[in-house]
Image (cartoon, grey):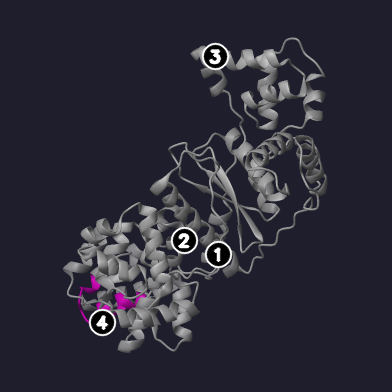
C-alpha cells in the first residue's frame, strides 16, 4: 500500500511503476488530514507527506518502510515498526516474488548507486544468497 | 479546520497571480468552494489537495506550514515598477523564503540576534549618513578599506540575505524586519554584482539608520549616501586619486571598480560629489554613455570579479538534513524542489 501524497513526491516515470503494480493506493479524507496535521505540528522537522505515511501506518498497524533517518527515528520512538529497502528486497525473495538470482542482482545494483546504505548488511546477504543459489544448482 | 492551510492556500494563489475562478476552473471545483478553503471553513480531501498543489506549484507540505513569525511590511521602493498581481506574487515568494530561513535556524537552535551599534544617532543630513558609515565600520571593526564580500559580512552580523529570481529588472531589493527584531534583506538574483553590492548597503542603511521624520525621498537619499560611503569612502577615494583631477583615465576607474566593487557610473558620480572632478565632467560622462553605444558597452562589460551570493540557507538545510534534524521530504519542501531534484542536486555523498 502506498499513499497518494507520497506518490506525488515522485517523478512521473516512478509514479507509473507504482500505478502499474498491484499495490493499493491510500487516500486521506478531511478528518484524516486534520489528524495528520496534529502530527506535523509536534514534529516540525518532518514534512506533511512524512507524517501522512506515519499516521496511516499507525492506523493500519502496518510496517513503515522508509530510507529517511529522521522519519525512521521519530516513528520508531512512537512505537512503530520501521524498515528500510533491504527488508523489502528480503521480503521479495522470501515470498518468491522474484527469482533468487534477480534478488542478488538488485542488491548489487543498490550497493553500486546508494553509498548511504549499510554495505556490510548488503554484503552479508549477497554472500548468503549466493551460497543458497549455488546449493539450488 | 486548519487556519494555516487557509492562509497558505490564499498566499499560494496570490503568488501564482490566479483568481479564485481560475483556480476553481482548473481544479474542477466551484469558486465558492475555493473561497471556503481560503476562509478555513472547509478542508479538501487528498485528491483535491494534490490538484491544488500541482496547479499552484507548491508542495503539499508548504500548504500546511504554520505561520510562526510576524513578518514586517514587505514594501518596494517608490520607483519600483512592480504593480498589482506581480507585486503581490513577489511579496508572497519573499514571505515563504523568509519563513523557511527562520524555521531552519530555529530547528538548528541558532539565534537570530542582531544589534545595531549606531542606533542612537538620528540622521538628518547626507553628511550624517556618510559619518554613520564610518562609525559602523569602526563599530564592526572591519577597517575603512574595501569590503570584499558584503553578503558574508551581513550574515556574520546576523542580517539575513535572501535572493529571489526576479528577471524583469523591476526589483532591486528591500529590507524588512521579522518579529520586529530580526533584519532581512532581499535581493534580486539577476542583478549585476555591483548593483547587488550597492543595494545591500542601501538596504543596510534602512536597517541601521534612524532618520526620524525624514520624508521617504530624503531617507532614500540618506541610504544612497550611506551605501556609497560604505563601499568607497570619500577619504579612500582621495587617497586613491588625489584631491582634484582635470583629467581621469578609464583605467583608473576600472582599478577602483575592481578593488571596491562599485560600478563605474557610481564611482564617476561620487568623484563629482566629492569635487575630485568637476560637475561638467560628470555630466559629459553620462551624456557620452547615452549617445555612444560602443562606450556604453565598454563600461557595462567591465565588472567586479568578486561574488555576492548567499549560500547560508542552503548550507543550514543540508546541515539539518545530515544531522537528521529534518527529513529529505522536508528539505525538498524548503528548497522548493522535488525529492529527486534534491537528491541529484544536493545529496551527492562523498
Report the label total: 4
**Towards the viewer: A72 or B52:** B52
Q: Which mark is residue B104?
A: 1
The local crowd at label 1, few if under 14, some if 14 to 19, many if 20 or more residues have their Cα within 10 Å, is: many
Name the residue tied to disc 3.
B295
Asked if B132 appears above or below B68 in the picture, the reply is: above
- Which label lies toward us, 4 or 3? 3
Question: Visible in this render: residue B202?
Answer: yes
Q: Are marks 1 and 2 on the same chain?
A: yes
Q: Position of residue B110 (x, y in %)?
A: 64, 65
Q: Earlier in the sequence, mark 1 or mark 2?
A: 1
Residue B334 badge: 2
Front residue of A23 and B240: B240
Q: Give the CA separation, mark 4 to mark 2.
A: 39 Å
Q: Residues within 10 Å of mark 2 (few under 14, many from 20)?
A: many
Q: Are marks 2 and 3 on the same chain?
A: yes
Label 3 sits on a secondary structure element that is: helix
Q: Identify the secondary structure beneath mark 4.
A: helix
Q: Which mark is residue A94?
A: 4
The verdict on a common chain for dots 3 and 1 is yes
Q: Residue at x 61, y 64 (%)?
A: B179
Q: Position of residue A90 (x, y in %)?
A: 31, 78
Residue drawn 55% across the image and 68% down it: B323
Residue A89 lies in the magenta-colored region: yes
- Give the camera-side residue of A55 and B136: B136
The chain to which mark 1 is attached is: B
Amino acid at each position: 500500500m502506498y499513499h497518494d501524497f507520497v506518490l506525488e513526491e515522485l517523478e512521473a516515470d516512478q509514479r507509473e511503476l507504482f500505478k502499474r503494480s498491484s499495490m493499493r493506493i491510500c487516500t486521506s479524507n478531511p478528518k484524516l488530514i486534520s489528524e495528520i496535521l496534529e502530527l506535523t505540528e509536534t514534529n516540525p522537522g518532518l514534512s506533511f507527506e512524512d507524517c501522512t505515511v506515519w499516521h496511516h501506518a499507525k492506523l493500519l498497524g502496518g510496517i513503515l518502510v522508509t530510507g529517511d533517518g529522521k522519519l525512521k527515528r521519530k516513528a520508531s520512538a512512537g512505537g512503530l515498526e520501521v524498515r528500510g529497502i533491504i527488508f523489502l528486497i528480503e521480503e521479495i525473495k522470501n515470498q518468491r516474488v522474484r527469482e533468487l538470482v534477480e534478488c542478488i542482482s538488485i542488491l548489487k545494483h543498490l550497493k553500486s548507486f546508494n553509498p548511504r546504505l549499510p554495505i556490510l548488511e548488503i554484503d552479508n546477504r549477497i554472500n548468503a544468497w549466493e551460497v543458497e543459489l549455488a546449493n539450488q544448482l | 479546520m486548519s487556519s494555516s492551510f487557509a492562509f497558505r492556500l490564499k498566499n499560494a494563489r496570490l503568488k501564482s497571480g490566479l483568481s479564485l475562478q481560475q483556480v476553481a476552473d482548473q481544479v474542477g471545483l466551484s469558486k465558492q468552494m475555493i473561497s471556503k478553503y481560503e476562509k478555513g471553513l472547509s478542508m479538501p480531501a487528498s485528491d483535491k489537495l494534490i490538484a491544488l498543489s500541482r496547479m499552484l506549484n507548491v508542495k503539499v507540505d508548504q500548504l500546511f506550514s504554520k505561520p510562526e513569525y510576524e513578518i514586517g511590511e514587505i514594501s518596494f521602493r517608490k520607483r519600483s515598477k512592480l504593480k498589482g498581481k506581480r507585486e503581490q506574487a513577489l511579496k508572497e515568494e519573499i514571505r515563504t523564503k523568509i519563513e523557511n530561513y527562520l524555521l531552519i535556524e530555529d530547528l538548528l537552535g541558532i539565534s537570530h540576534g542582531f544589534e545595531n551599534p549606531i542606533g542612537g544617532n538620528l540622521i538628518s543630513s547626507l553628511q550624517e549618513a556618510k559619518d554613520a558609515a564610518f562609525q559602523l565600520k569602526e563599530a564592526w571593526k572591519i577597517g575603512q578599506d574595501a569590503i570584499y564580500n558584503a553578503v558574508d559580512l551581513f550574515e556574520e552580523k546576523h542580517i539575513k540575505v535572501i535572493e529571489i529570481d526576479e528577471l524583469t529588472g523591476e526589483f532591486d531589493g528591500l529590507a524588512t524586519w521579522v518579529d520586529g527584531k530580526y533584519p532581512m534583506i532581499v535581493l534580486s538574483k539577476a542583478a549585476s554584482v555591483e548593483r547587488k553590492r550597492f543595494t545591500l548597503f542601501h538596504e543596510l542603511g534602512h536597517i541601521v539608520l534612524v532618520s526620524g521624520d525624514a520624508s521617504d525621498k530624503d531617507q532614500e537619499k540618506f541610504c544612497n549616501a550611506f551605501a556609497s560611503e560604505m563601499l568607497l569612502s570619500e577619504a579612500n577615494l582621495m587617497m586613491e586619486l588625489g584631491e582634484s583631477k582635470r583629467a581621469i583615465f578609464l583605467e583608473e576607474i576600472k582599478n577602483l571598480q575592481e578593488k571596491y566593487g562599485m560600478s563605474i557610473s557610481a564611482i564617476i558620480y561620487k568623484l563629482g560629489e566629492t569635487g575630485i572632478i568637476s560637475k561638467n565632467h560628470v555630466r559629459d560622462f553620462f551624456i557620452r554613455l547615452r549617445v555612444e553605444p560602443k562606450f556604453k558597452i565598454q563600461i557595462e562589460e567591465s565588472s567586479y570579479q568578486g561574488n555576492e551570493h548567499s549560500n547560508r540557507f542552503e548550507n543550514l538545510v543540508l546541515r539539518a538534513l545530515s544531522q537528521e534534524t529534518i527529513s529529505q521530504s522536508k528539505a525538498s519542501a524548503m528548497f522548493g524542489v522535488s525529492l529527486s531534484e534534491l537528491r541529484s542536486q544536493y545529496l551527492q555523498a562523498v
